[in-house]
Amino acid sequence: MSRLPDHAEVVTGGTAPVRAGWFHSPTVVAGVRQGDEIAQEEIFGPVVTPVQPSTDEDEALRLANGVRFGWRRASGPTTTRAPCTPGSSG
């Protein structure tokens, strides 16, 4: 958390529990941008960055797929389409 950019904010957590080992408390970070290290690099631990806003599904997919390791998820705007189910074409 020490390398977060100035525009990002730890909402909760962000500290190491008082016990042996390499642990990190569950953490929520707000204000993360697509190019930030925390959005682009792997984070091993219970760290969540809230969903970045998107204007449409294409932008949501671009944000979700625009990371080096592909570990993030993104949500787009509300849609009236039925959700995809296994075996369906969408």
Image (cartoon, rainbow, N blue to C red):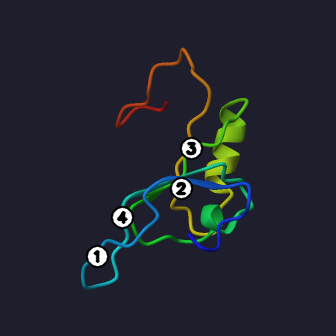
Give me the C-alpha separation between circle 2 and circle 4.
19 Å
Question: Which numbered disc, 2 or 1, marks the residue that appears first in the sequence?
Answer: 1
Question: Which numbered disc, 4 or 1, marks the residue that appears first in the sequence?
Answer: 1
Foreground disc of the pair 3, 4: 4
Badge 1 element: loop
Question: Which numbered disc, 3 or 4, marks the residue that appears first in the sequence?
Answer: 4
Which residue is the extreme one toward the top?
80
Q: Quadrant of residue 52?
A: top right
**CB under 8 Å between callouts 3 and 2?**
yes
Foreground disc of the pair 2, 4: 4
User: Which amino acid, mark 2?
Assistant: Arg
According to the picture, the residue beneath numbered tag 3 turns out to be 74
> Which residue: 31% across, 71% down?
17
Badge 2 element: loop
> Which residue: 53% across, 71% down?
42
Give me the C-alpha separation between circle 2 and circle 1.
29 Å
According to the picture, the residue beneath numbered tag 2 turns out to be 72
Q: Quadrant of residue 67?
A: bottom right
Foreground disc of the pair 1, 3: 1
According to the picture, the residue beneath numbered tag 1 turns out to be 18
Q: Is residue 80 above or below residue 88?
A: above
Q: Quadrant of residue 22?
A: bottom left
35 or 58, which lies in front? Answer: 35
According to the picture, the residue beneath numbered tag 4 turns out to be 25
Residue 32 picture location, percent across and down? 66, 53
**CB under 8 Å between callouts 2 and 4?**
no
